[in-house]
Amino acid sequence: MNRPATERIHTVEIPITGMSLLVPSASIAEVANVPVLTPVPFSANWLLGALPWRQQALPVVSYEALIGQPPSTVGTGSKVVVFYPLGGRKEWEFFGLLSAFEPRPHAVDTNNSNAADPDDLPASPFIAGGIKLADRIMAIPNMDALKQAFYP
């Protein structure tokens, strides 16, 4: 008996305070160490600062603050996950998300994952949905909402 081919998506789990985000690995340019973040005056509380990256200032965001929780802070194991520019933005408009720890790769397919119950996720326009992977619930960021917040 032939089984239908299962589409496998290569993803990255980004640990943040209290939960994890799950994003396609193709959306990530790099994972960087966190040197000193330079504050950005008069910015929203979710913009933690900027760091020098590839000869440009990279804005670093706290996803926790975006979803209504206290902003994250840089810790010993923190990393910055550098995302490619959001759709419709300039090719140099990268942004970073502060990760509590080293992000982890996952291969997701219908055999190892299920949709998460929306009641198990924070109620936020920045959460598009969730997935249950290995008995853990991970939130999927809403990239359209991010674009609206970053570029009003």
Image: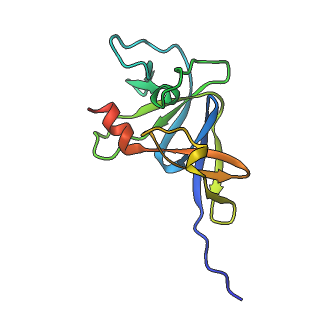
* Quadrant of the image occupied by residue 95: top left
Residue found 48% across the figure and 31% down from its top: 67
With 46 as the anchor, is 70 left or right in this view? right
Residue found 53% across the figure and 20% down from its top: 70
The vertical placement of 131 against 13, above or below, is: below
Residue 80 is situated, as x and y percent measured from the top left of the image, at 54, 28
With 86 as the anchor, is 106 left or right in this view? right
Give the position of the N terminus as an image quadrant. Answer: bottom right
Is residue 85 something that shows in the picture? no
With 52 as the anchor, is 114 left or right in this view? right
Residue found 49% across the figure and 42% down from its top: 28
The vertical placement of 125 against 51, above or below, is: below
Residue 60 is situated, as x and y percent measured from the top left of the image, at 45, 25
For the residue pair 106 and 67, the one nearer the viewer reads as 67
Is residue 77 something that shows in the picture? yes
* Quadrant of the image occupied by residue 152: top left
Q: How many marks?
A: 0
